Amino acid sequence: MIRIGALVSGGGTNLQAILDAIERENINAKICCVVSNKEGAYALERAEKKSIENCVIKKSDFNSQKEYELALVKYFKERNVDLIVLAGFMVILGEDFINEFENKIMNIHPALIPSFCGEGYYGLKVHKAVLDYGVKLTGATVHFVTAECDAGPIILQKAVDVFDDDTPEVLQKRVMEEAEWVIYPEAIKLFSENRLKIENGIVKRR
């Protein structure tokens, strides 16, 4: 069974989707700890309800980004995590953290990378940009995290229709329900079964 650590900032809907899928689909994985960069994040309550160890580690409590990232590294290594999932984590992680867990950090982005991604594209801003551009398909992407924002090897993608009367909020909900909550657990399942292999920056299934 793989041990998963989660990084969160807000409500934790993707965290909940992962927890539910692990139970429902008997995925050989366990979320053993949840870390938030914000006090009062509802994701911590979700963890508490499942008796999962949780805590707050705030960037503002450290003198530098490097110190903050090394504290996160220490926390997760002490708990022997095999995979780290970013579930609505609103802090950009740098090389000091990422290099310690190379190809062991996953993120989900609410668009079809390489469209509508990178610095500044997060939350409702992504869906507003999709609507402003007038594309007819959007979706979600699970990828491994690298030092370049939203540029890591793509694991899974799922498309979602865009309708003329969509608002950013309506589209966000559809993308979460039809794509994010489906492919994030699926990617974790593939990882837990050692079925993901990276060749020349491209993820292939074994």
Image (cartoon, rainbow, N blue to C red):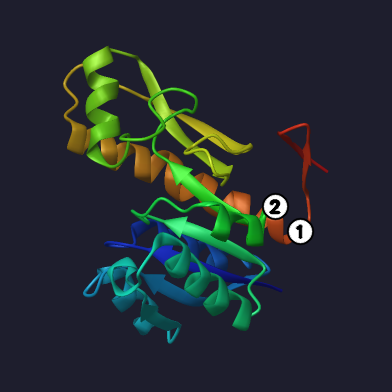
Amino acid type of the residue that numbered disc 2 sits on in the rendered structure: Leu
User: Residue 62: where, in percent of width, then height?
Assistant: 35, 72
Q: In the image, what residue occupies the spot 27% across and 61% down?
A: 10
Dot 2: element = helix
- Give the alpha-carbon distance from disc 2 to disc 1, as whole Å: 5 Å
Measured along the vertical axis of the image, is residue 197 above or below residue 189?
Answer: above
Q: Which residue is mark 2?
A: 190
- Label drawn at residue 116: none
Q: In the image, what residue occupies the spot 55% across and 55% down?
A: 185
User: Residue 104: where, in percent of width, then height?
Assistant: 65, 57
Q: Quadrant of residue 35?
A: bottom left
Amino acid type of the residue that numbered disc 1 sits on in the rendered structure: Glu
Q: Is residue 116 visible?
A: yes
Crowd rating for badge 2 (residues with CA inside 10 Å; few <14, some 14–19, many 20+): some
- Label drawn at residue 193: 1
Q: In the image, what residue occupies the spot 54% across and 44% down?
A: 147
Q: Residue furthest front?
A: 63
Measured along the vertical axis of the image, is residue 162 above or below residue 91?
Answer: above
User: Residue 141: where, in percent of width, then height?
Assistant: 50, 37
Q: Are marks 2 and 1 in contact (CB under 8 Å)?
A: yes
Crowd rating for badge 1 (residues with CA inside 10 Å; few <14, some 14–19, many 20+): some
Measured along the vertical axis of the image, is residue 164 above or below residue 40?
Answer: above
Q: 73 or 13, which is in the foreground?
A: 73
Q: 178 or 97, which is in the foreground?
A: 97
Measured along the vertical axis of the image, is residue 34 above or below residue 188?
Answer: below
Q: Quadrant of residue 25?
A: bottom right
User: Residue 98: where, in percent of width, then height?
Assistant: 58, 55
Q: How many marks?
A: 2
Quarter of the image where the C terminus is located: top right
Q: 36 or 190, which is in the foreground?
A: 36
